[in-house]
Image (spheres, rainbow, N blue to C red):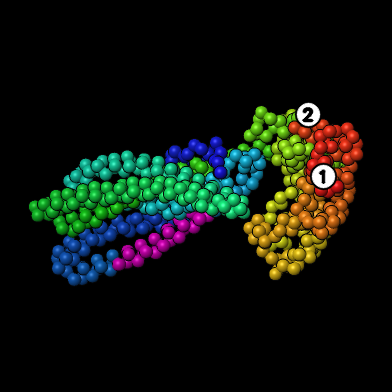
Amino acid sequence: MAHGSANTAGRPKGDVKNLKPLMPYLRPYRLHIIAASIALIFTSSSVLGMGKGLQYLVDQGLGKHDTALLNEAFWMLMGVTVLLAVATYTRFYLVSYVGERFVADIRKDVYQHLLTMHISYFEVTSTGELLSRLSTDAQVLQTVIGSSLSVAARNILLFVGGFALLLFTSARLTGYVFLMVPVVIIPIIMIGRRVRHLGREAQKRIAEANAHAEETLNAMRTIQSLALEPYENERYSQRITAAMNASLGRISTRATLTALVIFLVFGAINIVLWIGGQDVLSGSISSGQLSAFVFYSVVVSGAVGAISEVWTDVQAAAGAAERLSELLALKAEIISPQTASEKTITQQASIRFDHVYFNYPMRPEKPAIADFTLDVESGKTVAMVGPSGAGKTTIFQLLLRFYDPKSGAVLLNGVDVRDYALPQLRSLIGIVPQDPVIFSGTARDNIRLGNIHASDDDIIAAARAASALDFLQAMPSGLDTYLGEKGVQLSGGQRQRIAIARAVIRNPKILLLDEATSALDSENEHAIQQALDRLVAGRTTFVIAHRLSTIMKADQIVLLNEGKIEAIGTHSELLGKSALYARLAELQFKTSS
């Protein structure tokens, strides 16, 4: 059912350079990062200092059987431990804070950017894919910025400092350690590539499962009416299983990498300890030096193991960063002009379609409308009729500037709609679709969407004008009743009356009505039609008409067929001169007549 867009089919490569475009999001938190870095340096230095304290404790306290020196070494190490705990808390909190803010800022910017994208982008892009980027990919980034990078920096400092102290403590033993480093590093690099590939595959499978779930849950009425529950359950199970198998493959490979690193590192430490023990027996180094060397070896090996784990996280984050950067880099095809028309529409709006040609991006071979020319005077009502696919809805799409014509122009009061700022243009238009969208929230919230600055009195007046007030006040919490996702608690007619109230409160100059009474029963249709008559009065109105009552009230009727105007006139005129209109009137308007 769901399909990803072409521009999301290519998966990220996991190159760490992909993180660079998102680094500016860290700039507002420079002070937090500096403070966390100071705490990080302190904690790393404290850990490394414990090795020298251990050497002092063994050689001076234990070696000389001096209780005072032993106590002194104990309290010194205890003091360092307390400071280490405080600094660790500071580092962890600050880094986590930066990570949360970093990802929140990215999510807000990506969502804001998606809101500006042209409609055709969403027609070819899976919603599940976009949600995966906003949730899963952003969460991967949060983990890395808010934790993994700090862990990596800490362990790099421990590795560098620990290696230097190993060299200072015993150059000979360090030489043996140095010889074993390639044995540990090479498997990390080789297996790490495999982990990265499996991580990308797992992300892809999860996105596919999310897209399927999102689409089917939004079509639950259709699925249940067709008794498709077992079928869809099996399809979702297959996608989840594929995602699980991809994740288990990544987990298995990563676990293998971790186990191999531990075996190699601690095997190397064991060898070095055996050699170091020989040196203690021969008197080349002291017991305290060997103890310190062992301590630093554990620190260095632990740092190597931690860095190997973090590296796979960083590569996964690089892939996620690339996917989010792709969204931020998208260019909307429909944008406001840099110098928008400052013409204020205070009076009514006249519309002219001037030799407009348009085809949808997914159907380039077939024009939706061709050489379409139409003049609509201010305050007039135009009914558009024609067979399915004739181009009626396309007229609405062009007026709202969801698309731009391939050639020709749509003029509003003599000015090309492409010269108006998009918010200004769309603020002039109110639309009542045949299948209105009701958002999760209350009736009051849904009506207010027509004018977010409307008062409660305005909302009540709009609901009354749309004949919606009575049934809304009869609900458990009146206008504050939660309507459910997509308004599942409302009937089709009630949803349409909410949409009409939304248009009423908008007080638009131009009305687009997709047969706004089509879902209403006979009892309510008359009241709604009266409300629409009041709403239409004095406004430039386009109506996609399916009922004779709408046709009869229009100032002119435009008959469309295959994207072209076949005839224009009144109902009686068209009956006499158009066989197509006569057939449509016989079939489509039969029940109304």
Q: Amino acid at mark 1?
A: Phe
Magenta segment: does it hold 146?
A: no
Q: Secondary structure at mark 1?
A: loop
> Which residue is nearer to you in this view: 532 or 509?
532
Give above or below for 569 relative to 473: above
Give the percent coordinates (x, y) of residue 115: 64, 46
Q: Is residue 135 left or right of residue 483?
A: left
The disc label shown at residue 589, or none: 1
Give the percent coordinates (x, y) of residue 384: 81, 40
Residue for point 88% across, 40% down? 571
- Residue lying at the far left in this picture: please name it: 282
Give the percent coordinates (x, y) of residue 458: 80, 61
Quadrant of residue 477 within the rendered picture: bottom right
Provide the residue designation for mark 2. Answer: 371
Residue for point 49% across, 41% down? 322
Where are the magenta residues, as a range?
78-103
Circle 2 residues within 10 Å: few <14, some 14–19, many ≥20:
some
Q: Is residue 199 left or right of residue 278?
A: right
Quadrant of residue 114 within the rendered picture: top right
Q: Main secondary structure of the magenta part?
A: helix
Q: Earlier in the sequence, mark 2 or mark 1?
A: 2
Residue for point 59% across, 54% down? 224
Q: Is residue 275 left or right of residue 92?
A: left
Give above or below for 176 relative to 299: above
Q: Secondary structure at mark 2?
A: strand
* Residue 311 in view (yes/no): no
- The image quadrant where one finds the N terminus is top right
Mark 2–mark 1 distance (CA, rounded to whole Å)? 28 Å
